[in-house]
Amino acid sequence: MLLNTSCLRQDSHCTTLMGNGRYCLQPTTTMLPFEVQQKVEATIKSHHETMVTEIAVNSEGMQMIVLTPFGHPLMHVSYNNNEAKVLVSPDSRLDPAMMIAMTQLALWPVASVRKGLNSPLHLEESAGKRRYFANDKLVLEVQYLDMEGADAMAPAHKFQLSLPSVDLKLDIETLPEVEPAP
């Protein structure tokens, strides 16, 4: 396995995942532009929260806005293909590259994701599932539950992201587009 030395420096486009594996964000040019609104059901241990995310990807970067179910902004993360920044956050400890990385690890093409993985992090992919390991320990699992409605513009309709080391599950479902009122 080759080590991607561009990710060894500490900067705002690389992040350390659980298990000490590093991932460097990949350019948004590897994706077709898309905009999606998703319902996110987050469960950490026995605590449950519901959020809405709005994600916009184009050749110049990515914007991710996390909202309460009532539309109040909780977080706004931006990535311009060079650096990830937090524009709004409830917690100053939030790593913006980690937020963008979770999205890329779930939705970006496998070939692009593999370019950003650094030892000891590696990906095993099977039908409907991506599993990321560091030192033979599962650090992230993505299960694609419903690919119906998924296309190049919205890569996965319904999926679950799991981080076993912190007992976190994110059930994510693309919301239908709402037509503007006449």
Image (spheres, rainbow, N blue to C red):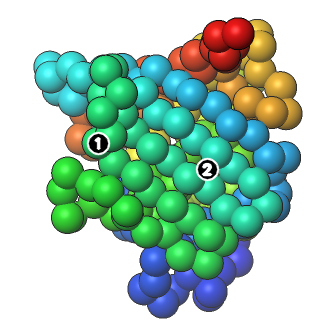
As displayed, is residue 95 above or below residue 42? below
Comparing labels 1 and 2, the label whose residue is closer to the camera: 1
Residue found 46% across the figure and 83% down from its top: 11
Q: Is residue 45 visible?
A: yes
**Front-most of 129 and 168?**
168
Residue 111: percent from left, percent from top: 80, 55
Rendered location of residue 128, percent (x, y): 69, 23
**According to the image, label 1 marks what residue?**
74
Q: Determine the secondary structure under disc 1.
A: strand
Q: Which residue is mark 2?
A: 104
Q: Secondary structure at mark 2?
A: helix
Q: How many marks?
A: 2
* Circle 1: residue type: Leu
| Mark 2 crowd level (few <14, some 14–19, many ≥20, 10 Å Cα) | many
Q: Residue at x 40, y 52 (%)?
A: 76
Q: Residue at x 56, y 53 (%)?
A: 63
